Amino acid sequence: MKTTKRCLAFLSAAIMLMTAFAGCGKSTTTSSSSGSNVSNASGGDIQTGDNSAEESTESTDSAVDSGDVGVSNGGGTTSTGKTPGSATSSKKTSGSTSSVAGQTERIDMGGYEFVLGTAYYANYLNSEGVLDPTNPLMKAVARVEKDYNCKVKFYKFADVSSAGTAVVNAVLAGDKICDVAQMQFSRCRTVAYSNACHDLKTLKGLDLTTGNFEKAITDAFTFNKKVYACNIGENSNVQGLFYNADLLKKYAPGYDVMKMYKEGTWTEAKFEEILRKISSTSGQKVTPLVGSTGIMALSAAVNAGGTSYKSGNKVTFGIVTADGIKALNYVKRLYNDKLWKYPADTAFATGGAVFTDGAVWQTKSYTSVKNLEFVPWPKGELNKYVVPAADGIAWCVPKTVKKKEYVGLILNALAESTAEMKSNRVRELEDNGWSANSIAVYNWMQSNHQIDMTTGPEIGAFSKKIDDSVFVANIQPAAAMQSISAAAQKAFDDYYKQFIR
């Protein structure tokens, strides 16, 4: 196999499992009540997305670095949420409050214009290209406008890759770009390390401990007890293994992977045993395992506790640790013994492979597999199921919001869309042929995954050595990782120390 074909590109593979949410064109704003009113911010018959000229702003705490980092394609999350009880509102003086027994206190915001900046505006449109009133988030928007006497407008970032820079530059200029910004994890990290967003714990009315906010994401954005971002909904980037249950039964009879998962006996050793059985029984007519991206990233997550993982303020590059080296040796053995085919191809979707790694959102590519199942990557050295999520969507609050005291209340109310949108995701999985067992796995993963922290640190220089340690026969992972471990970990330390203040 040619070198270009063999290259695993592990470091990018750890962040490639994400849905490419479309984002192109100029930044624009749209009123939630007039879905077709969208146009260029640079001119035309509709107002610009930047309304800072009319609004005073809070000053930033310090100078900001406007650089953006990470990959250019978008995250793969879909928001979902708890449907709230109906709330009543009455005409009252701006700023006054009212409450109904069992409901959140409501504040009359006097027509305040709340701007939701997003790189994923297309997610909220119907087939006719206008804002969809049946979308769970749009239902929440309608409730917010009624309950708080405010107006919600959308600000469209020009594209996914520039969203973080756009917010940072606006804060540098002292301009309000939006009240809350919805963007890819890596772009949100740009805003956070640039000190351009509020600590969400300082926002009145925002309760991040409810089931409407995903703990894995708030944890990933928490440094020194300050929370720089959250999300609304679920994360369809959670990664595991898809398998064709019919082919498994045919070529490895007696191995019930779903049962092993439930009993806690689904391990990497057992997985390798199954792959070898498939290879010998089929006479290599089918491929035991094909990788949709970098299966090494998943194996590292299992063996090392994460490809890169966070504990407190410390982010560790797991692949260069002792357990990471065990992961490299594992996938090197699978590759050398032709149990794992890489680069990826279409073999799994066409019935030519039994297993493939991937994220939940990729299931739409496998509707042709009639008996599709999904499980976590098997247990490794840590004897636990480690579920990584490479990327997704996060929400942050720029420091130049006009009414900080309103933003937490509105964000908290918008998050009440979580339960309905999660139900929509489950319905989609059912429509794609998922079994009740696989859906139960997905639901468990939502509460038990961790965010991969690889996007951001400058570690591209180490990619080739990591790849070669797997694909080049005479290069051993232990020696290769020893040669880069100090420098690679320093890259993580240097990047994430910017979040500590």
Image: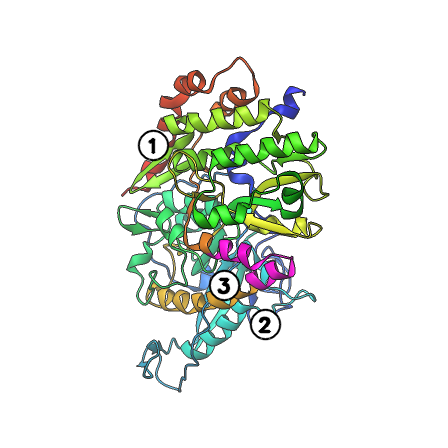
From this view, report whether residue 293 is shown above or below residue 128: above
Q: Of the residues under marks 1 and 2, which one precedes in the sequence?
A: 2
- Give how far across and how far down residue 204 sits, in percent: 30, 66
Q: Residue at x 64, y 31 (%)?
A: 279
Q: CA distance from mark 3 to mark 1?
A: 34 Å
Which corner quadrant of the image does residue 489 belong to?
Answer: top left
Q: In the rendered structure, does residue 434 fall within the stretch colored magenta?
A: yes
The reply to whether callout 3 and callout 2 are in contact (CB within 8 Å) is no
Give the distance between the C-alpha atoms of the residues marked 1 and 2, in whole angstroms: 44 Å
Is residue 360 shown above or below 430?
A: above
- Highlighted magenta segment, given as a residue range: 425-443
Q: Which mark is residue 134?
A: 2
Q: Residue 228: give x, y in percent of width and height.
A: 36, 51
Q: Residue at x 44, y 48 (%)?
A: 263
Residue placed farthest to the front in the image?
254
Looking at the image, which is closer to me, 209 or 43? 209
Identify the amino acid type marked 1: Asp
Residue that label 1 marks = 493
In-front residue for pair 214/21: 214
What's the magenta bit mostly, secondary-structure-wise?
helix
Q: Residues within 10 Å of mark 3 (few under 14, many from 20)?
A: many
Q: Is residue 481 magenta?
A: no
Disc 3 target residue: 80
